[in-house]
Amino acid sequence: MREESGAPYSAYGDPSRPTIIFIHGIRLGREVWAPHARALANDYHVVTLDLPGHGALAPIPFTSQNLNALIGGVIERFCTARRPLIVGYSLGGYVTMNYAAEYPDRTRGLLLAGCTLDFESWKRWPYELSVRLSQAIPETLLSRLLDVSLHLTLPKALADVVSPIPFNRDVFSRTNALARSHTRFSEKLAGYRHPVLFVNGEFDLVFRLDERRFLKRLPQARLRVLRGTDHTGPLRRVEEFTSTVRLFAQKVFAHDPHGR
């Protein structure tokens, strides 16, 4: 692994190999992808990012401009030989879709996990309510509640990794604003023409609500369901999810082994 002091990313493997960029979900950080990255590093150059409002970028506002600048800068730095495959999980999936819709030819393909939900009408009400509650709770209490939530939803070893990662509570309100402005990500991404793989946990019922709509909008897209797990499947099932990424990457880069 290669890291630069204060940098919002970590890099694994040989930079001359095809690049896979991993983007995490809300209240997480690039550390959650370390096991996946190490497993893939023999065959790929893997870069893991901190999103604005998280980790090394905790003080940076979570805005579309900052997100696109971050991803664009990483691609420009690490992907001079060929375009990357981006793996986006949960919030990271929406971030990835937003970037790919704006810059469709800067990526070679997308693997989008836990994000086949369009935030429209009643579907965004639960999140809006949770955001309002988070704004009404004192910072110290909110941090404790988030920590308890982490330990209830993730394996203890992983929760212990995530818990100390810096997080800016402003991310909640800013993601809510972005969801309001892009209520149908399925439509926003409809013009993307490169390979897409959606990965969902079998029991991730909320984020599977619009699964068929996303697949219809993107005829080239395929779906992989992780059986017996929920929204946290990509983090809990490291070996299975990594294998899914590897197989998809082989197909993606086989179509464009030398060029951009």
Image (cartoon, rainbow, N blue to C red):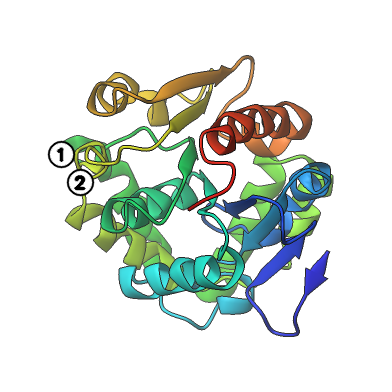
Q: Residue at x 59, y 57 (%)?
A: 145
Indicate left or right for 118 with 38 as reference: left
Above or below: residue 96 compared with residue 119: below
- Report the disc number at residue 121: 1
> Mark 1 packing: few (<14 Cα in 10 Å), some, or many (20+)?
few
Q: Position of residue 65 (x, y in %)?
A: 32, 74
Q: Residue at x 56, y 59 (%)?
A: 27
> Which residue is identified by label 2?
183
Residue at 23% from the left image edge and 28% from the top image edge: 217
In this view of the protein, can residue 29 be seen by the observer?
no
Judged left or right of residue 224, residue 34 is right
Residue 118 placement: quadrant: top left
Considering only order in the chain, which callout, 2 or 1, is on the residue closer to the N terminus?
A: 1
- Relative to the observer, which residue lies in front, 93 or 155? 93
Mark 2: secondary structure:
loop
Three-letter code for the amino acid on which mark 1 is drawn:
Ser
Question: Where is residue 236 drawn, in percent x and y?
Answer: 72, 34
Instruction: Tell me the kind of residue under disc 2.
Output: Thr
